[in-house]
Amino acid sequence: MIRLAQVIETFEADFLVQYRDRLRPEHTRALAAMKQCRTQASPMMQVQCTECDHRKLVPHSCGHRHCPHCQHHESQQWLERQLKKQVPAEYFLLTFTLPSEFRALSWAHPRVVYDLLMRCAWETVRSFSRNDKQLRGTPGAIVVLHTHTRRLDYHPHVHLVMPAAAVDGEHRQWRIKRRHAKGIYLFNHKALAKVFRAKMLAAIEAAGLSLPARYPKDWVVDCKAVGSGRTALIYLGRYLYRGVIAEKDIVACDNGQVSFRYRNARTGKMERRTVSGAQFLWLVLQHVLPKGFRRARNSGFLHPNCKRLIALLQGLLKYVPGQAAAWVRERSPILCACCEAVMVIVQTRLRSTFREPMPVPIATGGALTI
């Protein structure tokens, strides 16, 4: 398997020459963290054998949320939390896409536009749920921001996983959509797109940003049933803490180029894309989010403050959510090289003896950032 740290080590110089002017501080921090992830330059932890007392130093992972080599356990913990909140209803996956004409705006103001994108998507389904004849209440949704396609191109969009159900707080009622011969129908995707478009345009102007000179009249919103929602949650959790590409999908790194594989959404077949090493690093780093930005949010009755409500619903409806443990793997143990017994961590964050020089500051608009 080709490590991303190896790719950075090989092509970092070329990457900085070509893309230095596009980098923001969060990109630089991510690049430095992923380059040193689990290398001799990273902080060390001391582990000790439980049988023979053998000790050794092991490099720490960088812990950066966009590093494909880290945060596996955090992704599984997030998935476990979401599965515990399941309710007895048909789940739907809704996708709200920002038109390509707005990508320059979102790139220039990522924190503002990403936040508006998530908020407007949620407000759209909330208004539809409250006006729906069968629901007439507040829905619950898991909202996740993605900025990439499977080819790693820049493509901001928001996924919502939501049950076809709502809570009427005023009348203390739980309502779900009725099943018909053709299944359960949630909302009309064209109507969703019209309302989302209006909310998004108004929000951008209210934020003091200028709209593009031209943008389409018809926007795209997709709405499809996903059964219990488990498959959709597993898909969303895959890219939540581990960056936009798995290291096992980096299949070649030679002759100044990097090849990676991805699954074509239309055909379902695996395809390969080959780009220069510098361009590959840019394809990965352009999806680094602003510092502190939350890309996954729970809204409505799935909000973290509604734990008691969810427990009450599950109890009254006699519903037991799926066993989350089936999707959660324990951390791989560190085995002793002498006796192959399990080793335990006895000390962390030890300073490494290996040190690289500080990165050269990047000039942006007259100011220096590192």
Image (tube, grey):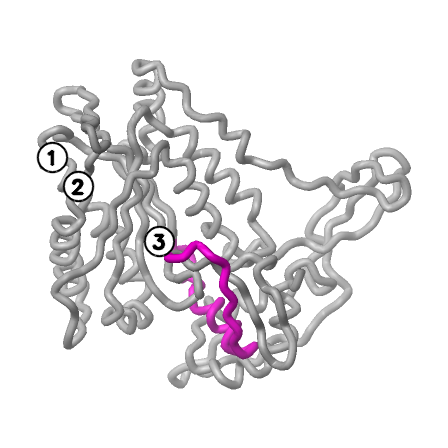
Where is mark 1, residue-wise? 132
What numbered label is drawn on residue 262?
A: none
Mark pair 1, 2: CA separation: 9 Å
Q: First in sequence: mark 2 or mark 3?
A: 3
Q: Residue at x 64, y 81 (%)?
A: 255
Residue 355 point in image, percent of width and height: 72, 70
The residue nearer to you, when weighing 20 against 156, is 156
Q: CA distance from mark 2 to mark 3?
A: 21 Å
Q: Residue at x 50, y 77 (%)?
A: 279
Q: Secondary structure at mark 3?
A: strand
* Residue 20 position (above or below residue 128): below
Answer with left or right where residue 73 lies relative to residue 321. right
Callout 3 amino acid: Leu
Give residue 145's mark: 3
In which quadrant of the rendered view does residue 49 lie?
top right
Mark number, residue 187 = 2
Asked if the residues shown at circle 1 and circle 2 are in contact, with their CB atoms under 8 angstroms apart, the answer is: yes
Few, some or many residues within 10 Å of mark 1 (<14, 14–19, 20+): some
Image quadrant holding the N terminus, namely bottom right
In the image, 166: left or right of 143? left
Residue 343, how many percent across, how many down? 79, 39
Q: Point out residue 50 in the picture as x, y percentages from the top left corner.
A: 83, 34
- Residue at image coords 15%, 77%: 213
Observer-side mark, 1 or 2, equals 2
Specify the segment rendered in magenta.
266-293
Q: Residue flagged by tag 2: what amino acid is it?
A: Phe
